Amino acid sequence: MCFTSDSIWKSLFLHIKKLNMKKLIIMLISVISVYSSSAQKYTNKYIKDASIVAENWLDNINDKEYENAFQMLSNEVKVRYNKETWMGSINELMIEFGELKSRKATEKKFQSEAEGMEDGFYVFIDYTSSYTNTINHNEHILLKQNDKTKWEIVDYNYEFKNKEE
């Protein structure tokens, strides 16, 4: 018996043709659903893990543990700033903000890219915060997972109004 690619293809096609088309569609939908739910599971885990790092970093800042906070920055950020200068700047910023009264995460999202950065795993977290010296205070943290799957702070931004204004 001689097999040609044409005869193999016909035997495969006939087998598929014999399958109930409805079963085939259900099978395809099932495979897609499993893949989709698995991806969502990992996305939620990334957001949860990054959120813990962000909260710890903010706690270090608010507790004046600036050296610990500096260590949680990404290597790219650490290269740009001298540790003592960064710690001094954060200290001055926290004096301007005053004591933290409350903070609540308002949005958390995962993305595989961030503007101006290489592709990777990124989590963006927005907070509404209340400090003694500010009003309408919002904080934004961008975290990136490094090559050792550790979440690091890549960017911190904020906007607020002074209470005196």
Image (tube, helix red, strand yellow):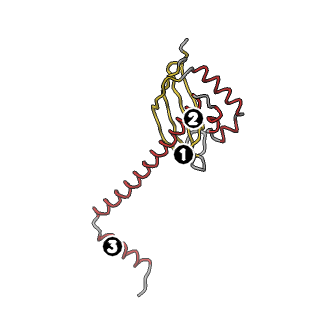
The residue lying at 68 percent from left, 30 percent from top is 86
Q: Please say if 132 is above or below 77.
A: above
- In the rendered image, the quadrant that contains the N terminus is bottom left
Q: Are marks 2 and 3 in contact (CB under 8 Å)?
A: no
Choose mark 2 or mark 3, whichever is in front: 2
Question: Label 2 is placed on what type of residue?
Answer: Trp
Q: For numbered disc 2, what is the local secondary structure?
A: helix
Which residue is denoted by mark 3 in the rendering?
Answer: 15
Choose mark 1 or mark 2, whichever is in front: 2
Q: Please say if 162 is above or below 146.
A: above
Furthest residue to the top? 164
Which residue is denoted by mark 2 in the rendering?
Answer: 57
Among numbered discs 1 and 2, the one appearing first in the sequence: 2
Q: Are marks 1 and 2 in contact (CB under 8 Å)?
A: no
Q: CA distance from mark 1 to mark 2?
A: 18 Å
- The crowd level at tag 3 (other Cα within 10 Å; few <14, some 14-19, many 20+) is few
Choose mark 3 or mark 1, whichever is in front: 1
* Left or right for 165, reference 84: left
The residue lying at 29 percent from left, 63 percent from top is 23
Which residue is denoted by mark 1 in the rendering?
Answer: 121
